[in-house]
Image: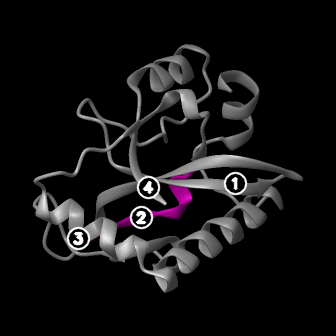
């Protein structure tokens, strides 16, 4: 798994094609760090997905929906920072850029955490389980519309 950021043109395309009707794709101008997970199975086909990191996950959120990471400088007291499974979305590699971590101790530590075999397995298994539930219709308003992204953007 790699830390990456998704190019702005992906989000612009998704917005212009109305593939994000509920504005649930997490993005920002600087390029939000995401974890690139290669080849998760969705509707019988293996696809690449990215899972955004989020700095302020509410303590009311089910702990099964994210992988907790050490707080960053934007994480407010009482909230969590983590890899937020319910915000994952499919991606084409043409929209991916490396997330540069050289000289950034915090992000190097994050990379070490996600590279641990037991953490890598947990993240991948949790994302795949999320996709199984999503495919079965167990989704909510706060999740990106995976089917629309596949149909309109990719």
Q: Earlier in the sequence, mark 3 or mark 2?
A: 2
**Image location of residue 37, percent across then percent down:** 57, 56
- Picture residue at 50% right of the left edge, 25% below the top: 10
Q: How many angstroms separate mark 3 from mark 4 (CA)?
A: 13 Å
Q: Read off the magenta span.
A: 80-88
In front: label 3 or label 2: 3
Asked which secondary structure carries label 4, the reply is strand
* Label 1 neighbour load within 10 Å: few <14, some 14-19, many 20+: some
Q: Is residue 44 left or right of residue 123?
A: right
Asked which secondary structure carries label 1, the reply is strand
In front: label 4 or label 2: 4
**Image location of residue 121, percent across then percent down:** 57, 78
Q: Quadrant of residue 32?
A: top left
Furthest residue to the front? 102
Asked which secondary structure carries label 2, the reply is strand
Mark 1 sits on what residue? 39
Q: How many angstroms separate mark 1 from mark 4 (CA)?
A: 13 Å
Q: How many angstroms separate mark 4 from mark 2 (CA)?
A: 13 Å
Circles 1, 3 touching at the beta carbon (< 8 Å): no
Mark 2 sits on what residue? 83
Q: Earlier in the sequence, mark 1 or mark 4?
A: 4
Mark 4 sits on what residue? 2
């Amino acid at each position: 798994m790699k830390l990456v950021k998704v190019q702005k043109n992906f989000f612009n395309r998704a917005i212009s094609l109305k593939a994000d009707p509920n504005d649930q794709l997490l993005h920002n101008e600087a390029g939000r760090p995401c974890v690139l997970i290669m080849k998760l199975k969705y509707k019988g086909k293996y696809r690449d997905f990215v899972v955004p990191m989020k700095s302020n996950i509410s303590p009311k959120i089910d702990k099964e929906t994210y992988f907790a990471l050490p707080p960053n400088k934007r994480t407010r007291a009482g909230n969590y920072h983590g890899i937020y499974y319910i915000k994952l979305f499919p991606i084409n590699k043409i929209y991916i850029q490396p997330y540069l971590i050289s000289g950034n101790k915090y992000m190097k530590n994050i990379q070490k955490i996600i590279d641990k075999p037991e953490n890598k397995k947990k993240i991948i298994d949790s994302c795949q389980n999320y996709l199984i539930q999503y495919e079965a219709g167990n989704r909510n308003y706060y999740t990106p519309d995976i089917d629309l992204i596949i149909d309109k953007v990719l």
